Image (cartoon, coloured by chain):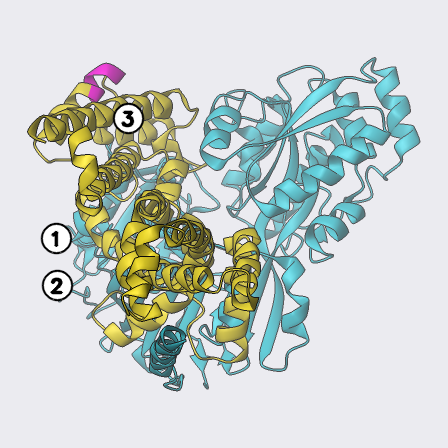
Amino acid sequence: MGYFIFRRTVGFLLTLLVVSAVVFAVMNVLPGDPALTILGMDATDDALAALREQLGLNQPVLTRYFLWIWNALQGDFGISHSFRVPVSELIAERLPMTVSLAVAGMLFTLVIALTLGIGAAARHRKAGDWGVMFMSQIGIAVPAFWLSMLLVLLFAVKLRWLPPGGFAGWSDPVAAIRSLILPTIALGVVQSAVLARVTRSSALEVMRQDFVRTARASGLSRRRVLWRHVLPNALVPIVTIVGMQFAALVTGTIVIENVFYLPGLGRLIFQSIANRDLPTVQALVMLFAAIVVTANFVVDLLYVVIDPRLKART
Amino acid sequence: MADFSRIFTASTIALALGLSPLTAAADQLVIGLQQEPTSLDPTADATASIDGMMTMNVFEALTTVAENGEVQPNLATSWDVSEDGLTYAFKLAEGVMFHDGTSFDAEDVVFSFDRAMAEESVNPSKDIFKPIESVTAIDPQTVEIKLSRKDAFFLFNMGQGDSAIVAAESADTNNTDPVGTGPFKFENWTRGDRLTLVKNPDHRDAGDVALDKVEFRFISDPSAATAAMMAEELDAFPGFPAPELLAQFEADPRFRVNIGSTEGEVILAMNNAKPPFDNVDVRRAVATAVNREEIIEGAMYGQAVPIGSFYPPHGTAYVDLTGAYPSDTEKAQQMFTDAGIEGTTMTLRVPPFPYATRSAEIIQSQLSTAGIDARVENVEWGFWIDEVYKKKNYDMTIIAHTSPNDMGNFARGPDYFYGYDDAKFNELWGQIETEADPAARDALLKEGQQYLSDQSVHVFLFQLPLLGIFTTGVEGYWSSAPVLYMPLKGVSNAG
């Protein structure tokens, strides 16, 4: 186990290093100049030169890269070229939004998918099962931005129950929750449709096994068998998918953030790429990569917790 | 299914949280903006929404420009111009305070100009300060500015965000915490979401300010902007990005739609330094192949005024030259054949603005019927401003020039992305720049328009419209914008 964690940590650091090199290289190859993007079409050459000097763009690429690594190792991710504030400050501002949305989306997905998936498995080849399968097929097929627009039209424009977008932070919790409801649904529907199908098929497989029949025969209720015996044994494929989905939820909020004009990390990275704001892009891509790698790592650890038989193999 | 009912109960509670009624306060205004700024200092960043929110609201300048384009007193209450037109003595308003409580006087003016003109200055319009030789504080209420040459646009330029007057104490932090002298004070900014201004009760014109609080919300997606207006989350969207979505607001009695004009001339720019566009006959052929009415109809849903040269139709010197090259596909085809370039392929690199990308498709088809294969390349803004604008790596492009009085672009020489270098026009622009008499200047500007149309430097397409949507209680907004800002001083909201 100790060796396993050591191996994964080294892999984690190597991944981040490779990611940082790739981002740096791509951003430097990409045509574009942050000074020009900031000062626009009427800028004089000396103003551009002065700004490049201020932003430290006059140093050679490699020097900038190693300087960046050196500072990053000390926890300093630099000053954003376009916002002119520390990148860490920008991320700290936006992280609560994106994390709130991703966590809410994950909870929504888990609650809906597990309930529907187990429920469908319990009603295998009955109307309820067909209904869930049909709904999940639709859920998978619907594009998130289109669903978002429909939700906004119904709940914000027509019924006026919820705001059509925006997020002013958690200082007003009621407003924050209201702002998150529609984006959460829009974000979670596709994911829960996928997960419901996985849960159903995984549960069906477990239900065919002998111990389930034994549990029923020993007098346990259907519900107890389903939630206490079938679900835990069906978890390995579910956790695999959930791990992938969590990464997708964090990195994939960009469409949702755009439609609901939420000030999250997805929009920040989009804007920063457009502005050629290298320090911000660099830090955000690293953050996303870290989240994905960590999610995979947690999934691997969870396997062992869920299914002690796997311990021997790690 | 107990679990379903539990979920249902939970979601019902969640929805009930949302049922508190939405109220609109009369002395407040919530404004939608498409473009999100990354900083708030108009003297250090060219992003148009900074001017839209800050200039003349938070920051003020020596002069200001009215809706009709007229220069009016502002922080300078009056000025005397010397006989030779080179020395301006500005009398400053008395008792003016910056929002942080420091007082405003001639030293602040000197500081602001020194800062904008310094070598390490990153002012986005440094050119407008070039004619200035010296700025001197004569006494706390008087500033004298000496010019090295006459500048017809000097007073106009002194009324822009680029020439805002800032205090030495706060200049370095204006990008996140702007401190000015204007009728509104900056309150807070949640980057990416909203920015709030409140009324400055100490402003000399506070009596004319109807709004107590103004909130800007940043919504880049046009459909999201439409939903936000429809849900009455916003009171105003003064620069609405999507002409195709206007009809539903026009049909809705809750809203008033305004279609005004901006300073943005939209052009099909041709790289004059590069064959075949170094040949005036080819440029004229392109102008003949292009049909403006079709472009305006298809790309702008009819909501734009065609232009035939590089000057806004609402300006005092405007001449209608839209008939100079009547659209005629067969004639254009013949002209291309005569120039020996029929069937050539060329690139049309387009920045990511709807007016440009949509116009490009229509122009591509118009050129193709005239025998020219234009390959449309949609590029993002960072690419465009570097590759097309700075490195001049393009054949044709479509862009709106949104600055006022910008005919001088054509006199910027071979280094400018037009690749146009014409001694005759340079001389003409030199006269325009230095002509102090408005009538004589207008006559020269007319000549300039005529000349640019005759040389067919670019194809002049249409004036970018100012599309605004307002709830019916909102009054006092400018219907056209001769500058990049829109003062909120005279705006009110009856709720």
Position above or below: B350 against B313 = above
Instruction: Specify whether B251 is left or right of B32.
Output: right
**Residue B64's spot in the image, x, y percent?**
41, 60
> In the rendered structure, which amino acid carries the disc numbered 1?
Glu
Examine the rendered structure and indicate whether residue B434 appears above or below residue B155. Answer: above
- The residue identified by callout 3 is A19
The residue at which mark 1 appears reads as B169
Q: Which chain contains the residue that carries disc 3?
A: A
Q: How much space separates mark 3 and mark 2, taking CA atoms?
A: 49 Å
Would you say the magenta stretch is mainly helix, strand or loop? helix
Compared across the picture, whether B353 is left or right of A58 comes to right
Magenta segment: A61-65
Chain represented in yellow = A
The residue to which callout 2 is attached is B102
Q: Which is nearer the eye, B206 or B230?
A: B230
Mark 2 / mark 1, whichever is N-terminal: 2
Task: Tell me if residue B255 comes above or below residue B328 in the rendering.
Answer: below
Colour-to-chain, cyan: B
